[in-house]
Amino acid sequence: MVRLRSVSGKTSPDPAYKDAIICDVIDVNPASSVLTNHLRRLFPVFTMSSAPKIKLNNGMEIPAVGLGTWQSKSEEVITAVSHALKEGYRHIDCAWGYGNEKDVGEGIRQSGVPRSDIWITSKLWGTYHSRVEECLDQTLANLGTDYLDLYLVHWPVPLNPNGNHPIFPTLPNGKRDVDHSWKLSDTWKQMEEMVEKGKVKAIGISNFSVKKMEEILPTAKIIPATNQLEIHPYNPQHELLAYLREKGIVPQAYSPLGSTGSPLLKDEVINEIAQKHSIQPADVILGWLVAKDIVALPKSVTPARITSNLNGAIAGASKLDKDDIAKIDGLAASGKQKRFIMPPWPVDLGFDNWPPFV
């Protein structure tokens, strides 16, 4: 048996259904799961939770919550992506370097959600800085689409395209083989050409400090739409985010809940705020990001967690007050500053709180 539950306070985004009662499908037994999925495909406007959107500097609007796919295994990511889209996500974040874009594409197909309804982001890998279109074409083929909504430079680190490994070329001393002769400004010129060719709608950057942005901005014809960074309460990067706001660049947060075993979900202040609003600690963290107009990209392959991340981010953003946000903003400065993602790039990335390169 399938029962429909009315969800109060929700309105249809489709004018044709402005007077409709928004519903969700609940209490489904295994025998009715096929019917449930059929209902969700037929009436997505009635069943999806809708994340707010953030306007980019080119006028496009990006969903403020997306599904991260880093380190997601093949079968897991197919199921994760399909489930996320059925549950209302409309933003999938992927990358050539993750090695699972074919599986992401399969998950999109299995969801039944039209490509035109989904925001897809991917990223240029380091060994392709001098061959942007070649990397992009591989991504498009793997995903099964003819365009991306957003294409990012994954790291401001050009790697030797003719090195001893296609992803992580290394030198005899074991260090990663960086192509120091290649200019990031030339990478960006090729990124701009992908917009001109219609293969991507927007372009941006990832893991760029002010130092690295200033290598591309003076000659850029297109200002990056976004900068995807490790952002969470223990690594808020306030000064960098202020610079982004000044330039009209929207910040995106990867690893917003930290990494495996992260102390964020056990933080006393975050838990106090969660109890205050009768929500979960993850809801507080994701809501904090969305409330600050930062795109949150939580990664999970667990269906229940995927669903709760979306609903929790929306709930958290609506419930946190100015005092809550101020308390979370101050956690890192109180002695809790911590990064979780620090690949051993043998270059000066220009970030605060990053180990010195050798």
Image (spheres, rainbow, N blue to C red):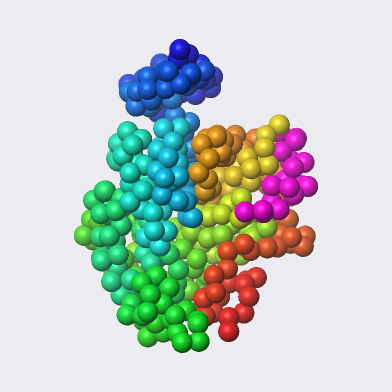
Residue nearest the observer in this picture, 172 or 284: 172
Main secondary structure of the magenta stretch: helix
Residue at image position (68%, 42%) is 281
Left or right: 345 as drawn, with respect to 180: right
Where on the picture, by quarter, is residue 324? top right
Q: Position of residue 96 (x, y in %)?
A: 37, 60
Residue nearest the observer in this picture, 331 or 88: 88
Where on the picture, by quarter, is residue 36? top left
Residue at image position (52%, 18%) is 27
Quarter of the image that includes the N terminus? top left
Q: Position of residue 17 (x, y in %)?
A: 36, 20
Image position of 146 with respect to 39: above or below: below
Residue at image position (39%, 58%) is 99
Residue at image position (73%, 55%) is 331
Whether residue 310 is visible here, answered yes or no, is: no
Left or right: 113 as drawn, with respect to 350: left
Q: Is residue 275 magenta?
A: yes
Q: Is residue 239 magenta?
A: no
Left or right: 76 as drawn, with respect to 135: right
Image position of 118 with respect to 36: above or below: below
Magenta region, residue range: 260-277
Q: Position of residue 110 (x, y in %)?
A: 33, 37
Give the total number of marks visible in the rendering: 0
